[in-house]
Image (cartoon, rainbow, N blue to C red):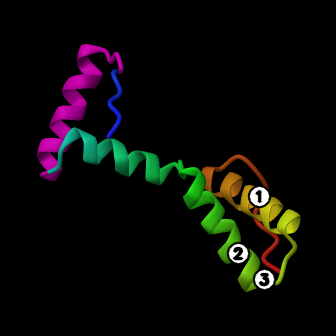
C-alpha cells in the first residue's frame, strides 16, 4: 500500500488524533472516510459508477458521464440539482 506524508499544523494534527480516538478509529480510517465523504473515487470506482448509472438509465456513455459529473457536483454543493429524469 502506498504511503503519503502530509504536513499539518500542530493544532490540526492534535484535532485529527483526538477525533480518531473519540471514534475508536485510526487516523488512516478517518482520512479514508473523509475521502469517501467528498466523493474521491478510484478510476475503477468511477467507471463502475458510470456503468451502473448507464445500465439503469439506458443512457449512452457520454450521457451517463455527464449525469455522473452533474450529480457529483450537486452532492459536493457546487452545482444545480440533478434533473431527476
**Residue linked to disc 3:** 57
Q: Measured from the top left, where is residue 3 in percent x and y?
A: 32, 30
Q: CA distance from mark 3 to mark 2?
A: 6 Å
Q: Secondary structure at mark 2?
A: helix
User: What label does residue 70 carry, if any?
Assistant: 1
Q: CA distance from mark 1 to mark 3?
A: 15 Å
User: What label does residue 53 carry, if any?
Assistant: 2
Magenta region? 6-24
- Where is 23 relative to 2, above or below? below
- Reading the chain from its start, which is encountered first: label 1 or label 3? 3
74 on left or right of 44: right
Corner quadrant of residue 28: top left
Q: Nearer the viewer, residue 79 or 25?
A: 25
Residue at position x 70%, y 75% in the image = 53
Q: Measured from the top left, where is residue 85 in percent x and y?
A: 83, 80
Magenta stretch containing residue 15, yes or no? yes
Task: Name the front one of labels 1 and 2.
Answer: 2
- Determine crowd level at label 2: few under 14, some 14-19, many 20+ residues with C-alpha closer than 10 A: some
- Where is 3 relative to 44, above or below? above
Amino acid at each position: 500500500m502506498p504511503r503519503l506524508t502530509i504536513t499539518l499544523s500542530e493544532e490540526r494534527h492534535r484535532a485529527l488524533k483526538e477525533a480518531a480516538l473519540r471514534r475508536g478509529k485510526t487516523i488512516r480510517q478517518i482520512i479514508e472516510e473523509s475521502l469517501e465523504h467528498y466523493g474521491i473515487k478510484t478510476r475503477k470506482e468511477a467507471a463502475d459508477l458510470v456503468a451502473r448509472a448507464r445500465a439503469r438509465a439506458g443512457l449512452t456513455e457520454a450521457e451517463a458521464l455527464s449525469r455522473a459529473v452533474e450529480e457529483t457536483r450537486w452532492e459536493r454543493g457546487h452545482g444545480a440539482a440533478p434533473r431527476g429524469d
